[in-house]
Image (cartoon, grey):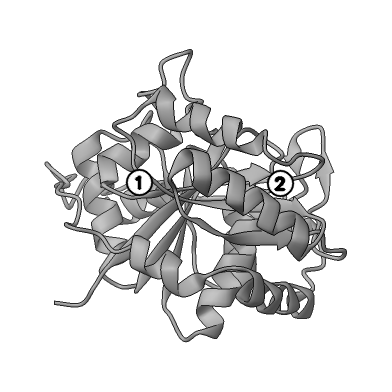
Amino acid sequence: MATRRAFILAGTGSGCGKTTVTLGLLSLLQQRGMRVQPCKVGPDYLDTAWHTAISGIASRNLDSFMLPAPILNALFTEQLQQADIAVIEGVMGLYDGYGTDPNYCSSAAMAKQLGCPVILLVDGKAVSTSIAATVMGFQHFDPALDIAGVIVNRVNSDAHFQLLKSAIERYCRVPVLGYVPRVEGVALPERHLGLVTARESVVNQQAWRDFASLLGRTLDIDRLLALSELAAMPIGEWGEQLAADAGEGLTLALADDEASIFITSITWRCWRAAA
């Protein structure tokens, strides 16, 4: 049986660089000849569009608010069986979900549900040993959660990284998989809604390939792949299907243009299944 891999790239909060690093990892893994399946925790439509634009693979929303666990698990397993690895971008901070319950609709909850390891992305700007306190706080908030590794973003130099790595591994006993240096040309455009959509932007594929090549030099990808191996695939089932004639006699038009992009792939699939 082929080895299946998946991990959730979770952050300490919004704006820490999750989407940028996710896109770089998607491109890098494809450069290594791997079949990737991009995913996003929650109902975010903008990040998934960027995943798709960079990878050429339709990104999937993992929305535990809308989908019961058995259905979501079945969908995830189905997608993963067609790929070598699922790269799942988290939402907001690792424990941010619905209200103040860290086990409902959060990246942490999704990691537990799917049995995926968490790779924690932390900001290394203007900090040294104190970064270990941040990582330790995320570890101790839920000791049952598998935070398998750490990636440090916005690092000034290799010497700076070695200082951060030493502090995290000394006090937190978790492997640091590398760092992301500051790079011009791959910052994603933003506005009040969040990111500008991929459709509205000119995607510079060469810039992202160059960024991926850079990550190949600053991240321990082999260690990341080893940590991402799943012990088992999530178990789920679709449950009752819609009747084959559910849409008989009904004409349904679905808009798909610049003004009508906020729809998930699973919604399309369910409507198609209903004929």
- At horizontal 40% and vertical 62% (from top left) the residue drawn is 86
Q: Position of residue 145 (x, y in %)?
A: 33, 35
Report the disc number at residue 250: 1
User: Would you identify the image quadrant in which residue 184 lies?
Assistant: bottom right
Viewed as shown, does residue 154 lie left or right of 263? right
Kindly tell me whether residue 172 is visible in this rendering.
yes
Mark 2 and mark 1 lie on one chain; the one further toward the N terminus is 1
State how far apart marks 2 and 1 are (Cα): 24 Å
Residue 275: in sight, yes or no?
Answer: no
Residue type at mark 2 is Ala
Q: Is residue 136 above or below residue 52?
A: above
Mark 2 lies on residue: 259
Quadrant of the image for the N terminus?
bottom left
Q: Is residue 171 above or below residue 97?
A: below
* Residue 221 in picture, x, y percent from top left: 50, 71
In the rendered structure, find residue 26 and report the number of the disc placed on it: none
The residue that appears at 43% across and 68% down in the rendered structure is 223
Q: Residue at x 65, y 37 (%)?
A: 131
| Residue neighbourhood size for the residue with mark 2, other residues' Cα within 10 Å, grouped as few (<14), some (14–19), many (≥20) | few
Is mark 2 in CB contact (under 8 Å) with mark 1?
no
Q: Position of residue 92 (x, y in %)?
A: 59, 33
Which of labels 2 and 1 is toward the front?
2
Q: How many numbered discs sit on the rendered protein? A: 2
Report helix, strand or loop for mark 2. Answer: loop
Q: Position of residue 130 (x, y in %)?
A: 67, 33
In the picture, the quarter occupied by the C terminus is bottom left
Give the camera-side residue of 33 and 165.
165
Give the structural element (helix, strand or loop) at label 1. Answer: loop
Side (left or right) of 202 relative to 236: right
Amino acid type of disc 1? Answer: Leu
